[in-house]
Amino acid sequence: MIPAPLALLAELTHRCPLRCPYCSNPVALTGPGAELDTATWARVFEEAAALGCLQVHLSGGEPMARRDIAALVAAASGAGLYTNLITAGVLLDAAKLAALAAAGLDHVQLSVQDAEAGSADRIGGCAGGHARKLAAARLVTAAGLPLTLNAVVHRQNLDRLPALIELALALGAQRLEVAHVQYYGWALANRAALLPSRAQLEAATATVESARAALKGRLVIDYVVPDYHAKRPKPCMGGWGRRFLAVSPAGLVLPCHAAESLPGFGFPDVRRTSLRAAWERSEAFNRFRGTGWMAPPCRGCARAEIDWGGCRCQAFALAGDAAAADPACALSPHHALLGAAVAEAAGAAEGFTYREPGRLPLPKAPAAPFSATKVKG
Amino acid sequence: MTPGAIPRFAPGMKLREDRARGQWVVMGPERMFVPDETALEILRLVDGRRSIAAIVDDLAARYDAERGLIETDVLALFTDLHGRGVVTGG
């Protein structure tokens, strides 16, 4: 019996007015012509709720770039899902927000790139973006919708973390998500410009801890720690195919939003199969589910069911093998790569390769087809 | 949280049934809490009108337990949930 997923990430589009150099979208962005239509998304939401999902994250790209966003919120809400809009905010206005609230939207998560406009607009690659986000935050709270502020942090904004916390309070957010960049795809290409130093990280962690204590009952702070200074990997997605599934703009059903970049997979297409069949029976979801696929040092490790081998995308990005232990683990033979990247970043320039279609070369196909022997070990 | 406080679910937090797993959950953005049977009985009485004292009275009338003990448990639950941003109360 495969436990049901708790949440669906619906990546409605890859269109976005921002060009953040750490975007979690794949390097191969999907064009608007390949996006799922309203009716197909409505079916996906119904199937997700029937499968056991409780929450849907309406994301992208920028979900407000979809003209049918209010209809999509209504469909998700009507299916019984808790609806969370993950937005950059620059396309929001009062009328659109009123339509979303009327459609049953439960919560808005708004991203900011920094606490200070000049830096924020440079990082997001969008002139005037920060001011629009502040206006969007005020619209959200004025509409009576709960607000989370999301700040992706890295070397170039981490020193302003106290100001980001102040900003969350000033904007009336109930929750602040401080998420260190996760380095795959676009972020991996910009890693040297983004990786924080150990001293920066320690200062940020101390800031979060003291703010949590001081603001208890006023502001919830969620903190996603970075791998690169860790000894143990994060339990990515709570384990492959355990709690979470994503659907890409073109309809691929994925165990995580970055998995599309892994070679050697035939991810199920929601236009041809049900979400339940994809979750329970597809080879892609079963490949890294549980612990049976693991090789040493994960196999037999006391933490195998705590961190689930870490992140498959990071294993592929750094070790060249999606079935390897996550190099964030000190037990991985590739762990030294992380320390080397931190050292390289210390003296690196701060320029970015911005997220734009065709800006980065697509990942190379592996020399040999994906090794089937590693799957069952 | 004091006996006079009127607890409410914080913005974005909702008590709802999770039919797939045969349980009730408090849903919030990117998180959920699964109350045990006792906590669920208490949370069902959160309606934005009743004070904590009134919730304790309701439970004391229905359950065979000393009011003082019930009040201790109820206050502890709301204090914990307030600290986690699940309920507000004034």
Image (cartoon, coloured by chain):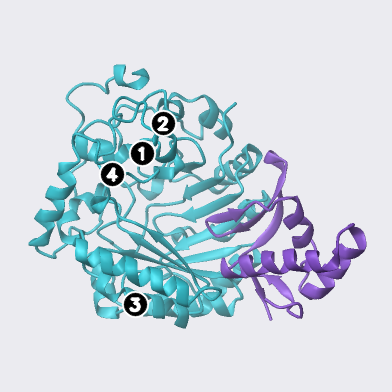
Task: Report whether mark 1 lies on the same chain as mark 3.
Answer: yes
The residue pinned by badge 3 equals A162
User: Do the residues marked 4 and 3 share a common chain?
Assistant: yes
The residue under label 1 is A259
At label 3, which amino acid type do we have?
Pro
Secondary structure of the residue carrying tag 1 is: helix
Q: Nearer the viewer, mark 4 or mark 3?
A: 3
In space, the residues marked 2 and 4 are separated at their CA atoms by 15 Å
Residue visible at 20% across and 28% down in the picture? A366
Please tell me in which quadrant of the rendered image residue B83 appears.
bottom right
On residue A267, which mark appears? 2
Q: Which chain is cyan?
A: A
What crowding class fits label 2: few (fewer than 14 Cα within 10 Å), some (14-19), or many (20 or more)? some
> Circles 1 and 2: CB distance less than 8 Å?
yes
From the image, state the color of chain B. Answer: purple
A108 up-or-down from A283: above or below: below
Amino acid bearing label 4: Ala
Chain letter of the residue beneath label 2 in the structure image: A
Dot 3: element: helix
Which numbered mark, 1 or 4, is in the foreground of this view? 1
Between discs 4 and 3, the one toward the N terminus: 4
Chain letter for the residue marked with disc 4 in the picture: A
Marks 2/3 in contact by CB < 8 Å: the verdict is no
Whole-angstrom CA distance, mark 2 to mark 3, is 41 Å
Residue A244 left/right relative to A225: right
- Point out residue B82 in the picture as x, y percentages from the top left corner: 62, 70
Mark 1–mark 3 Cα distance, whole angstroms, equals 33 Å
**Coordinates of residue A130 in the picture (x, y in percent):** 34, 76
Q: Amino acid at mark 1?
A: Ala
